[in-house]
Image: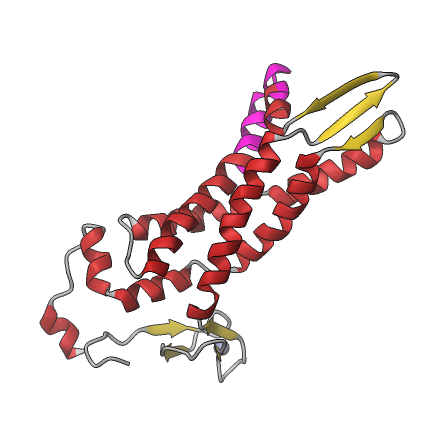
């Protein structure tokens, strides 16, 4: 560790033991010597992977929203709808609260998370910290539990199985896109955004502080630690 860098401490999530945080070689992880639980992983090696996966998820997200999910054929009457169409239908049926909940958990929050991650990841890969970095990472951690694409996917599958007895169900492009998106989100969510703080602090703690309007760390205070 650099002599000018302040000592970073990390607490074990399981047993609260405190350790000094050190930079790890690629593809390694640090474990708590007391209880054996994972403390943190090295991050530089999977920044490219998570960048590519987030970009792919964003493209799949657009496909999933733009195309119909299923087509129903009952006695020659066919109808199909996109997710937005289903939300509008809920709203028109006086189920406004439900429509807002579905919109937030399947469109707004997942989209916010993907765009915010890309906005943070791309400049970090290029070696600089984007403006508003701290606020965006907090925002990602706030919206993450509210993105429920996998719950939506389960709901759609259960409904499809029940509908098969009363109508012919033809899966459309968005159904497959939502299936792929569920898997991609599982990978994106497995990435801990806290790892990005480490990358940013390696790039320069003063830059993060300056960009977000916090007072810069005094030089003598940093040298003392
Ligand atoms: Zn522990």
Q: Is residue 147 visible?
A: no
Whether the magenta-drawn stretch holds residue 96 is answered as yes
Q: Is residue 8 above or below residue 76?
A: below
Magenta portion: prevailing SS class: helix
| Residue 184 image position (x, y, % from top left) | 59, 52
Q: Residue at x 83, y 22 (%)?
A: 73
Specify the farthest residue to the bottom: 33
> Observer-nearest residue: 222 or 173?
173
Q: Residue at x 71, y 42 (%)?
A: 154
| Residue 52 image position (x, y, % from top left) | 50, 55
Image quarter where the C terminus lies is bottom left
Q: Is 61 on the left or on the right of 155, as rendered?
A: left
| Residue 102 image position (x, y, % from top left) | 58, 32
Q: Residue at x 14, y 78 (%)?
A: 224
Stretch in magenta: 89-106
Whether the magenta-drawn stretch holds residue 48 is answered as no
> Observer-nearest residue: 28 or 103?
28
Q: Is residue 57 above or below residue 37?
A: above
Q: Is 19 on the left or on the right of 46, as rendered?
A: left
Q: Is 8 on the left or on the right of 218, as rendered?
A: right
Image quarter where the N terminus lies is bottom left
Q: Is residue 37 above or below residue 108?
A: below
| Residue 177 image position (x, y, % from top left) | 65, 41
């Amino acid at each position: 560790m650099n002599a000018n860098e302040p000592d970073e401490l990390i607490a074990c999530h399981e047993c609260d033991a405190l350790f000094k945080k050190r930079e790890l070689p690629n593809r390694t992880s640090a474990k708590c010597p007391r209880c054996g639980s994972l403390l943190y992983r090295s991050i530089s090696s999977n920044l490219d992977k998570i960048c590519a996966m987030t970009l792919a998820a964003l493209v799949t997200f657009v496909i999933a929203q733009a195309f119909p999910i299923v087509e129903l054929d009952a006695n020659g009457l066919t109808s199909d709808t996109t997710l937005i169409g289903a939300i509008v239908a809920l709203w028109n049926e006086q189920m406004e609260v439900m429509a807002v909940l579905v919109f937030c958990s399947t469109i707004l929050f997942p989209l916010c998370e993907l765009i915010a991650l890309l906005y943070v990841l791309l400049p970090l890969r290029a070696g600089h910290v984007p403006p508003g970095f701290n606020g965006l990472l907090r925002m990602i951690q706030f919206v993450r539990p509210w993105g429920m694409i996998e719950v939506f996917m389960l709901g759609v599958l259960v409904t499809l199985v029940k509908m098969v007895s009363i109508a012919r169900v033809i899966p459309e492009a968005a159904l497959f896109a939502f299936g792929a998106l569920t898997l991609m989100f599982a990978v994106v969510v497995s990435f801990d955004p806290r790892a990005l703080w480490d990358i940013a602090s390696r790039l320069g703690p003063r830059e993060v502080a300056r960009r977000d309007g916090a007072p810069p760390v005094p030089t003598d205070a940093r040298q003392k630690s």
